[in-house]
Image (spheres, rainbow, N blue to C red):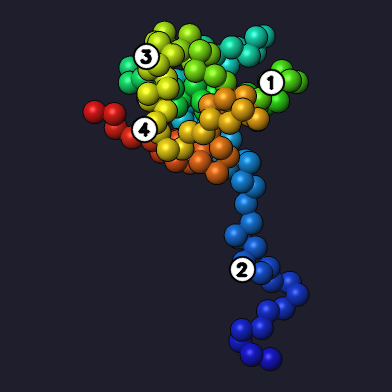
Amino acid sequence: MSSDDQSDNESDPLEDLYVDANNIDQQRIRDALTDLIAIDRETGNPRFYQGFDELDTKRRFTAVLLYRRALAALDDLEDDEGIGKGSGYFADLLDVDDSTIRHNVGDLDFVTNEDEQGGYHIPAHDIKRAVDYLQEDSS
């Protein structure tokens, strides 16, 4: 028996590569939003913290998109509601014009606008990029 052979009692070293992608994404979202946005347990509405107000508009938009991802992960979206929303929804929450949202989206390549999803959203495969962007130094 060669030294590379393993006994039945040893685990396969490749087993370490298995992860739960949903769990990793949920942890990333939680860590990114912790000091920015909370979710009202009764209504599902966002509750903004002081750190949120200190962000520029693009990062506030990104944070709200991640909040929408958190709602979906918590199964707290309405049955007929997609993960995305139109520019008016975000404009109202951020107290800016619709055109500001549409303009900012062009600079955020991790944001997609799909009718099937209800509008602007962050695809699952881009959550890490969105979190990284949100956590970058905005100065």
Q: Does the residue at mark 2 contact the one at mark 3 (Cβ under 8 Å)? A: no
Residue type, numbered disc 1: Glu
Horizontally, residue 1 falls left or right of residue 95, namely right
Tell me if mark 4 has few (under 14), some (14-19) or many (20+) residues whose alpha carbon lies within 10 angstroms of its own. few
Q: Secondary structure at mark 1?
A: loop
Quick one: label 4 or label 3, which is nearer the N terminus? Answer: 3
Task: Determine which quarter of the picture holds residue 138.
Answer: top left
User: At which x and y percent is residue 28?
Assistant: 51, 37
Q: Are marks 4 and 1 in contact (CB under 8 Å)?
A: no
Select label 1 or label 2 by which is in front.
1
Residue for point 75% across, 20% down: 79
Q: Classify 10 Å Cα crowding around label 1: few (below 14), some (14-19), many (20 and above).
A: few
Is residue 15 visible in the rendered structure shown here? yes
What residue is rendered at 68% in x and 91% in y?
A: 1
Question: Which residue is denoted by mark 1 in the rendering?
Answer: 81
What is the secondary structure assignment of the residue under circle 4? Answer: loop
Q: Earlier in the sequence, mark 3 or mark 1?
A: 3
- Image quadrant where residue 108 sits: top left
Q: Quick one: label 4 or label 1, which is nearer the N terminus?
A: 1
What number is the disc on residue 107? 4
Q: Which residue is mark 2?
A: 13
